[in-house]
Amino acid sequence: MISGIPVHLETEHPAIRTEGLIKDYKRTRALAGLNLTVPEGAVYLLVGPNGSGKTTTMKILLDLVRSDGGEAEVFGLSPIDDGARVRAQIGYVPEGGIPGYEWMKVGHLIRHHAAYYPSWDEDYAESLIRRLEIDERAKFKTLSKGEARRVQLLLALAHRPPLLLLDEPMDGLDPLVRDRVIEQIVDHIAENPTTVLASTHHIQEMEKLADHMGVLHDGRLLAQSTQDDLHRSLRRYQLEVPEGWTAPEAFSGTVIHQNGSGPELAWAIWGEEEQITGALTASGATVRSVSALQLEEAAIALLAGTEGT
Ligand code: ATP
């Protein structure tokens, strides 16, 4: 049996679970029935074009925004009924600034933030200040985008929360700082049991961190899978096909992206390579080569498959 693109993830211990989540902003449907599953301990990359609903999803998990339908849970708790307990377990790097606190000096902002978290680790915060080269004397509102992002990362990490919600954590960082931030996140995860949900347009840079990926489009997941499954199951097949060739029936729902027109085709197909190659050969196509897709290529192939829909 050739199976279709996976949109459901099975896990006994979800850190985050949403079912049929819907969010409307006046005339805009931001989430259109989102079924997101982030297993405990996963580093889950949520990718998707601008406006696909990544920020909205995180805000609903924090109860900063209320959904219009469906359910959301964080460690089995409802963000609406148990908002304070949910937020206490989350380190959040928001996409924008920190509204209401921009006038504070960074050192003041850090102390102010620390007061809300009993688990705040002063020594760790100090080491993050040094490692991320944070200037405590600067006013937050005078910081560049990249400098502000580093402060936000410190605020998210220093209480060692079990869940990190990182909304575009690489945004505004120069390439050198990006590497340092990735290293910092890698070290943090190695030393602290943490689940991470990170939205990003910098898939390649975050690939080495991630073990899961979900591809969001128009408020719905096109696919979500472990990185291992993606590497194993999503392949690009270079084909040579006879005139008038049509794809085998069994491929319905598995062809993610099609490139080229006969006789030379490049198709991204989900499934077991041996079965796919067998079915292609039986249909009269010649399989010239097969290659695995990197996460970014996989996301692009999935999103390209939606063009015109
Ligand atoms: P990006 O990659 O650009 O950050 P995103 O995937 O995070 O985008 P969201 O910010 O969740 O997307 O937005 C989803 C949709 O909802 C977009 O069409 C956006 O314009 C709309 N939207 C988000 N917030 C609001 C709001 N406060 N009022 C009206 N529309 C909104």
Image (cartoon, grey):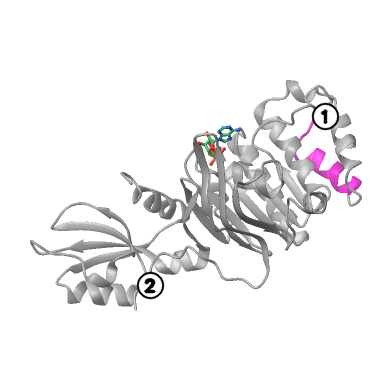
Residue 137 versus residue 275 in the image, above or below: above
Quadrant where ligand 1 appears: top right
Give the spatial CA distance, label 2 vs label 1: 52 Å
Q: Picture coordinates of residue 40 (x, y %)?
A: 68, 65
Instruction: Residue at 65%, 73% (x, y): give it.
Output: 12
Q: Residue 3 carries which label?
A: 2
Q: Residues within 10 Å of mark 1 (few under 14, many from 20)?
A: many
Name the mark nearer the viewer: 2 or 1. Answer: 2
What is the x, y in percent for residue 100?
78, 26
In what element is the residue under mark 2? Answer: loop
- Secondary structure, mark 1, is helix
Question: Which callout, 2 or 1, points at the residue further toward the start of the chain?
Answer: 2
Count the labels in the image.
Answer: 2
| Depth order, front residue of 182/254 | 254
Chief SS of the magenta region: helix
Task: Pinpoint residue 6: horizontal percent, then vertical percent.
Answer: 45, 65
Answer with the quarter of the image where residue 155 lies.
top right
Q: Does the magenta-highlighted stretch encompass residue 123?
A: yes
The kind of residue tagged 1 is Val
124 horizontally vs 232: left or right: right
* Of the pair 148 and 250, the residue shown nearer to us: 250
Q: Is residue 147 left or right of residue 225?
A: right
Instruction: Tell me, yes or no, whether the two marked residues, 2 and 1, touch with CB atoms within 8 Å.
Output: no
Mark on residue 87?
Answer: none
Residues packed near mark 2 inside 10 Å, few (<14), some (14 to 19) or many (20 plus): some
Magenta extent: 120-135
- State the residue position of label 1: 106
